[in-house]
Amino acid sequence: MIKQLQKKGLAEQGKKNLALAERNMKALMALRNQYKKTKPFKGQRIGMALHITKETGVLVRTFMDAGAKVSIASCNPLSTQDDVAAALIKDGADVWGYKGESKKDYYKYLKKVLDFKPTITIDDGCDLVTEIHLNRRGLLKNIIGGCEETTTGIIRLKAMEKEGKLEYPVIAVNDNDTKHLMDNYYGTGQSTIDGILRASNMLIAGKTVVVAGYGSCGKGFALRSKGMGAKVIVTEVDPFRALQAKMDGFDVMPMEKAAPFGDLFLTVTGNCEVIRMEHFRRMKDGAIVANSGHFDIEVDVTGLTKMSKKKVAVRPFFDEFVISANKSIFVIAEGRLANLAAAEGHPSEVMSMSFCGQFLAVDFLVKNASKLSAGVHFLPSSVDEKISKLQLQAMGVKIDKLTDKQKNYLGSWQEGT
């Protein structure tokens, strides 16, 4: 076991947190209860690179109950919850990760998962897929398919597909409505606020918040910032999303124009160098910068370090970069995912829907692997409908049903006004 996970009582605390998550992930637990009876994943070896949180732990347990063997590494050096990792090891999972791991350990642990010789990969950011295609090509012959959790990973997969480099089918789970319109929107909005407040204890009300990127994540964070009393400015490169932000009541301008106004900046674009040195130079003293995009490349922390006289670790996951006697800029979680490094990630109810998507995507791969070509694939809408029903049942919500006359009307072209 990794040394950091050997602390006395750690696994016991992890089991308590897993039990709490299971209580709040009723949709996924319903799938577990259904699939553990038949164990349809028996013989499958699932290699995962996901955030090792209590919610991910529930997914790991669910795969194991369905008959699979699981090996998991963290997809971010700061996101592992050590108590959960220790508990999963006690459960019999092959776990590689600890909070604050070095970059060297990060890649070493990804390779440990590949040493497991997975038949299915589950990624959050495409690192496993990339490593396999670049350095572990011998594994390709036994992999029936993979799943991808996040927008950044889908961007990378589509680039591979466009170049003809992706050699097995990968399900874009992120594109499920019950993922990107729930996890990204409701989850990122709340959990990012949580991480920012834990790190900085700043008051949101009365501040100017600059949100870089108005996809589902940016929309969720902008809405919650507005709800807490902030003035919100959105920066975008996509004309339609910029138009949406304006229609939603937010100011829209380039980052260069927004930089002097912002008290808090958040990047959620999936791209690199969104906040750069020229933007830091225009920021006011005391500005706080955070990121909730997958990789730590959206904020140029390296450039900020070079232009600073010194860096001070003020409190956990909250660093001050002293640029001059009259100006400092603060960065949350080293520019990595603020919601998972400085907080615990998305609430369990939201992740229940996302991980129902991962679970059903694996089920889809197992049943249809021989029919799927190499490339990026999307789950049928019936899967979103199933997950939505499971979550509504978990919440005790009932909805209407179409009458036979309504069904006939919707299926007819002869009915007029």
Image (cartoon, grey):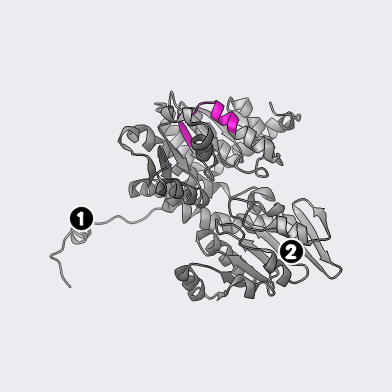
Amino acid type shown at disc 1? Asp
Location of the N terminus (image quadrant): top right
Q: Position of residue 234 (x, y in %)?
A: 57, 70
Judge whether residue 114 is colored magenta. yes
Q: In the orientation shown, which residue stands out farthest toward the left?
A: 414
Amino acid type shown at disc 2? Met
Residue behind mark 2: 202
Task: Examine the image and state in which quarter residue 198 appears.
Answer: bottom right
Answer with left or right where residue 40 lies relative to residue 305: left
Looking at the picture, tell me which residue is in the foreground, 122 or 193. Answer: 122
Kindly state the secondary structure of the residue where label 1 is placed.
helix
Label 2 Cα crowd, 10 Å radius (few <14 / some 14-19 / many 20+): few
- Residue 396 visible within the image: no
Residue behind mark 1: 404
Q: Tell me the residue at 76%/57% (across/down).
A: 305
Q: Which residues are magenta?
A: 111-121
Q: Tell me the residue at 58%/62% (across/down).
A: 221
Looking at the picture, tell me which residue is in the foreground, 41 or 148. Answer: 148
